[in-house]
Amino acid sequence: MDYSNEKLINYLKEHNIKPSTIRMKVLNYLFMNKTHPTVDDIYKSLKEEIPTLSKTSIYNTLDLFLEKGIVKVLSLQEKELRYDIDTNLHAHFKCEKCGKLYDFPISPNFFNDDHLDGFIINDRDIHLYGICKECNDK
Amino acid sequence: MDYSNEKLINYLKEHNIKPSTIRMKVLNYLFMNKTHPTVDDIYKSLKEEIPTLSKTSIYNTLDLFLEKGIVKVLSLQEKELRYDIDTNLHAHFKCEKCGKLYDFPISPNFFNDDHLDGFIINDRDIHLYGICKECNDK
DNA sequence: TTCAATTTTGTAATGATTACAATTTTATTA
DNA sequence: TAATAAAATTGTAATCATTACAAAATTGAA
Ligand SMILES: [Mn+2]
Ligand SMILES: [Mn+2]
Ligand SMILES: [Zn+2]
Ligand SMILES: [Zn+2]
């Protein structure tokens, strides 16, 4: 079930983003598909309901969302870029077999490390790679 | 002080890599510059002593080193790729001001997490971003 | 409705990486 | 040593995701 226009508009406004058709569609997609999609995933899916859609618009929209802090871009191995609507602190596990990207929680004081005294940490990427339980059980 | 040819050749042979001029030069560069260099860093530096050097050779060599497991490639934010001759478990801190990439140790059982029971972890990337002590003190 | 601002589109440019064939170097054999 | 084969290196062209940018469409105030 898609999000209501009202909810999407409010969410965008709360984050100082002027609502527009495409911004609402992309936001709805990200809310509905918490699979850490790529630019192409988003583009291909939305292209079906908006045949005139341009990929540049997806880039523009995601760049704006990044700037306003409502998405985070994950730089994975093999130059793979994925977008995450969940900007709260958490880590990721990428299955090398099925390609699925799993979330898992980490503690905020994960990095209370003497070696980093005096360092200001603004951002953290914790990416694990391997075989997920599901693929492993087969 | 550069590494001796003998040492470079032995190191390559130990890792099932046939020694060659360029492989030795790249390996020596990586041993001497533990700064997590980019392809371009390596290319530009070696180009000075080997004017005929082709960038393709750097790509070839690093791909071979990766395949044989003697380097690790770090996929950082902004699509930045850096090469690390230290393949032991450790984490990285990138300073957003000076650009320097710091190593810091982490414990092997860092990821003994219930959420990952049944998952096989083959590789870990822990990348922090912020301002380093040195930049911060200024 | 008119007009300006903003959004969206479409196309061309960019730039890092890759593919691949030609050349050079190295090692092997006669 | 010379001839030959194998491997390494080079140089150029192709690829492809992303970016730049100008044109077109849409929106929203006056
Ligand atoms: Mn996530
Ligand atoms: Mn390192
Ligand atoms: Zn899997
Ligand atoms: Zn710094």
Image (spheres, coloured by chain):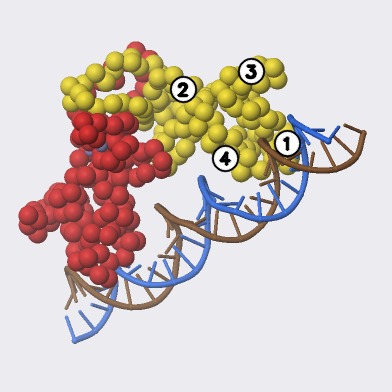
Chain colours: A red, B yellow, C blue, D brown
Earlier along the polypeptide chain: callout 2 or callout 1? 1
Query: Could you say which disc has been placed on residue B87 in the image?
Result: 2
Q: How far is mark 3 from mark 1, CA to CA?
A: 22 Å
Q: Quadrant of residue A125?
A: top left
Q: CA distance from mark 3 to mark 2?
A: 18 Å
- Find disc 1 in the rendering and name its residue: B50
Q: Residue at x 19, y 64 (%)?
A: A21
Dot 2, crowdedness within 10 Å: few (<14), some or many (≥20)? Answer: few
Sequence-first disc among 3 and 2: 3
Percent across and percent down for residue C19 are: 54, 52
Disc 2 and disc 1: Cα gap in Å? 27 Å
**Where is residue B125 shown, x and y percent of the image?**
36, 28
| Residue at 31% in and 55% down | A40
Q: Are marks 3 and 1 on the same chain?
A: yes
Mark pair 4, 3: CA separation: 22 Å
Q: Quadrant of residue C7?
A: bottom left
